[in-house]
Amino acid sequence: MGIEIRNLEAAYEDRVIIPCANVMIPEGKITMMIGPNGCGKSTLLKSIARILPIKKGEVLLDGTNIKKLSQKLIAQKMAVLPQTPIVPEGITVKDLVAYGRFPYQKPLSGLKKSDHEIIEWAMQRTGVYELKDRKVEELSGGQRQRVWISLTLAQKTNILILDEPTTYLDMAHQLEILELLRKLNAEEHTTIIMVIHELNHAAKFAHHIIGMRQGRILFEGSPNDVIHVENLRKLYEVEAVLIQNEKKGYPVCVDYSLKQS
């Protein structure tokens, strides 16, 4: 199931954020969007998920314009985790994860046996099953983020969209979430699209990287093809020092400084 963006223009009322974007999201891969704050990364994600209506152009989901799809059908095809999801007060882990089955429920119908099996599977896959009776608000940041990912897994979609899933987490918990997403991609063949700020995380975990600045896509491609000094100079206006992790095969930024005018 592929996602193609054609001549997309996105705006908040009359303020255009993305004037024109054309990009193909690789199916079954991890795609990460990088770039300065306010460059349009989250806006592009919201446009893909039809959270933000696009002004012009189109987003194709498996060849079909998403404007022609119902919200329920979109929710069965792609799961979205926003940057700062709000936890309902007093809700337990298993009840929050159960929200992922809503796109499949008929009006006034409850959860079926198959729904409960999927909810349990999602909690097992993300390592939160032992926390199922705990209140979400009592969990650590890393645990809470795994619960949200469990909710998206319970939707049983082929596409997972995440807006800065590692924000506010320490380094260990960031790696925990990224390793989990890589495992889901490898074992469930889930197409994962996310916004991330840490350049080295993108180089380490992404198959495909999209670099954005001022609402425009500057480059896209594999980490080895696009993470180099010239692209980082254009993207962030910094002079980067890069080395190659020869053992694992990806570039690493070891130092950087502001570009001299």
Image (cartoon, rainbow, N blue to C red):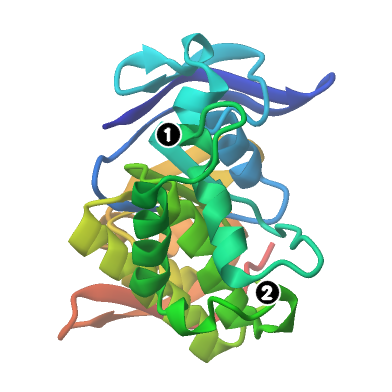
Near mark 2 (Cα within 10 A), the count class, few <14, some 14-19 or many ≥20, is: many
111 above or below 204? above
Considering only order in the chain, which callout, 1 or 2, is on the residue closer to the N terminus? 1
Residue beneath the point at 65% across and 85% down: 140
Residue that protrudes farthest toward the left in the picture: 247
Near mark 1 (Cα within 10 A), the count class, few <14, some 14-19 or many ≥20, is: some
The N terminus: image quadrant? top left
Q: Is any part of residue 225 visible from this angle? A: yes
In screen coordinates, is 198 left or right of 77? Answer: right
- In this view, the residue in front, 84 or 140, is 140
- Residue bearing the label numbered 2: 136
Residue beneath the point at 58% across and 36% down: 44
137 above or below 113? below
Residue 146 percent across, percent down from the top left: 51, 72
- Residue bearing the label numbered 1: 76
What's the residue type where badge 1 is placed? Gln
- Of helix, strand and loop, which one carries label 2? helix
